[in-house]
Image (tube, coloured by chain):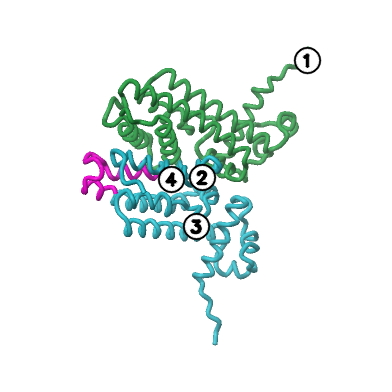
Chain colours: A green, B cyan
Amino acid sequence: MPKIIDHEARRNELAEAFWRVLARAGMKGATVRAVCAEAGWSRDAVDQLFAGKQALVAYAVSLAAQRALAHVRACCARLEGRQALRAVLLEALALERSGPAPAAAWLELLALAAREPTLAAELSRFDREVRAELAAVIAAMVARGEAPPETDPEAEARALFAFNLGLRTRARLEPAGYPEEVVAREVDAYLARLAGGPGPGE
Amino acid sequence: MPKIIDHEARRNELAEAFWRVLARAGMKGATVRAVCAEAGWSRDAVDQLFAGKQALVAYAVSLAAQRALAHVRACCARLEGRQALRAVLLEALALERSGPAPAAAWLELLALAAREPTLAAELSRFDREVRAELAAVIAAMVARGEAPPETDPEAEARALFAFNLGLRTRARLEPAGYPEEVVAREVDAYLARLAGGPGPGE
């Protein structure tokens, strides 16, 4: 009987090894060789799955974006209004917790994307998809009277996502100053203002 | 007569060459050798000024932060209220325009800082100093009745700075989708909400 190899599972395993090495050693250190070592695979086994580092990076990014988006959608399906936005910001987009990509790896990736249009396009697509989810939640809040009627859901979603990216970046640079409860407090203050005043919180 | 060399001017010249190479080639490509070539200097001349790449990076970051902070302070001294915040966001913190560090270089730097505590501390200090300026402007807005009395200037300043970092990052990844007028519109929408409604704008 021929040996059956689950290529997708193997690709995912390697993508996860890539993220760990990237977070630890930066893009410079995340060579195919280092990723092989991290995964405990031979170089040959890796070469059968990916045509090179660029293909591995593209796959790893696409996988992380897919997973994060699924997490965002699950939050928005399970909860509504401010509770949904809060869950998206504190869980689904808290990549250092929801994996597979640690926050330090995302910063490396943003830097690389600034010089690689294909990667930038993939990240921008992810960005748009998440913002569409956030805008739908905000539009429903307006419809239920949970946010002021003049709220522009698209604009609020863009601002919210920008705020979150900035907050995560700062928390990453100054971890001691941003324990989880401080991040949660900043998110809650932001969401209270979006809703036009203090609200359900948690 | 001995030759007088202005060490500070020479250090600054090299720091500026470093930022250009960093933006173009990433941290991996920004070797001391590449920076020498960019500046048109001999390696020896560079070695007299900096003990190595780490010292050069530290100097370049400190110089860029100092200049950006001076620009922020000038905006806040020249203007007040929303006009001051708008100028800070659209001029002083629009690093791709105000130099010396192009936006692509800042992304590289954030990625490096996530792994180098000294650099992270320098960026966090810059972050705090800018936020203190923004908070003072917002506190004055509250005192003049230009923002709701329940506004927390510190919290608003943190949120505003986070929003700006996220907006800049996204604009960097998707330049075609973020021409200057789109960035300005997002900033204005954000500031209008901070002030509790539509206001003077530009």
Report how far apart the C-alphas of labels 3 and 2 lie in the structure: 18 Å
Q: Is residue A68 left or right of residue B43?
A: left
Report how far apart the C-alphas of labels 2 and 4 lie in the structure: 9 Å
Circle 3 sits on which residue?
B99
**Image disc number at residue B179:** 2
Circle 4 sits on which residue?
B184
Report how far apart the C-alphas of labels 4 and 1 lie in the structure: 61 Å
Image point (33%, 41%), residue name: B192
Of the two numbered discs 3 and 2 on the same chain, state the one appearing first in sequence. 3
The amino acid at mark 2 is Pro
Residue range (magenta): B138-161
The amino acid at mark 3 is Gly
Image point (40%, 43%), residue name: B187
Circle 1 sits on which residue?
A2
Name the foreground residue: B23 vs B195.
B195
Chain bearing mark 4: B
